[in-house]
Amino acid sequence: MKPLIFAVAGKEPKIHETAFIAPGAVVCGNVEVHENASIWYGCVLRGDSNKIVIGKNVNVQDGTVIHADEPEMGGVPTVIGENALIGHRCMLHGATVEEGGFVGMKATMLDGSVVSTGAMLAAGAFLSPKKIVPPGEMWAGVPARKFRDLREGEDKHALMAAVHYVEEARRHVAALKAL
């Protein structure tokens, strides 16, 4: 099984040669995947309506769905900055995760919402449209609200995970070649 990568309405994905797109992932339309990024098994990045940018060293973990509405409908691109972590089964729609931002498993981010550099959105949280998680804070709940200030070093979790997932992707590439 290979990833499904294709153009939609003349919009073709741009994927850096060092990026890892796992078998079973779907990447279509106006999507940029930068160097050493990893898009894991079962992810869907659907750039048919608006742009999606996956920054350097980002890992988008298994089962995540990323999309955005058309600009004509007020939609904004989904942009994930360098060294950010997107946990398993997340949903990002017209959202921004700044460099080093952390989005926990099964979290949802809606149109215009932001996880800032050095901020965390907890597992299972629901970030409403246009809400911003400031640096140094963890937000949790449905709807997400400030849960607490981050403890020393927690703001670096995504950066540490970025290094781990670059190596993990290389191990998976080697394992897949051995099949």
Image (spheres, grey):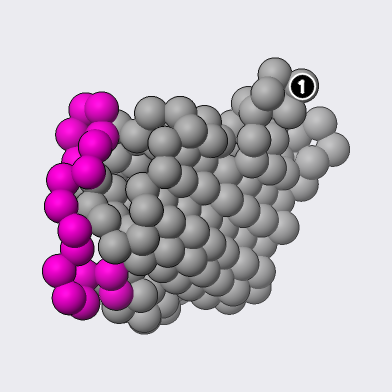
x then y, percent, for residue 43: 43, 44
Q: Could you tell me which residue is drawn at 36 percent across and 60 percent down?
A: 135
Question: In the rendered view, does 27 fall on the left or right side of 104?
Answer: right
- Relative to 94, is 162 above or below? below
Type of residue at label 1?
A: Glu
The part of the image, by quadrant, that contains residue 158 is bottom left
Q: Which residue is mark 1?
A: 72
Comparing 73 with 153, the one in front is 153
Q: Magenta stretch containing residue 88, yes or no?
A: no
- Relative to 68, is 36 above or below? below
What's drawn in magenta, residue-wise? 140-156
Comparing 59 with 6, the one in front is 59
Residue 44 in view, yes or no: no
Q: Could you tell me which residue is drawn at 16 percent across and 45 percent down?
A: 147
Question: In the rendered view, does 98 fall on the left or right side of 61?
Answer: right
Residue 55 in view, yes or no: yes
Q: Magenta stretch containing residue 144, yes or no?
A: yes
Q: Quadrant of the C terminus?
A: bottom left
x then y, percent, for residue 156: 29, 74
How many numbered callouts?
Answer: 1
The part of the image, by quadrant, that contains residue 143 is top left
Comparing 48 with 129, the one in front is 129
x then y, percent, for residue 48: 69, 32
**Disc 1 residue crowd, few under 14, some 14–19, many 20+, Cα 10 Å:** few
Comparing 134 with 19, the one in front is 134
Q: Could you tell me which residue is drawn at 59 percent across and 73 percent down?
A: 35
x then y, percent, for residue 110: 45, 31
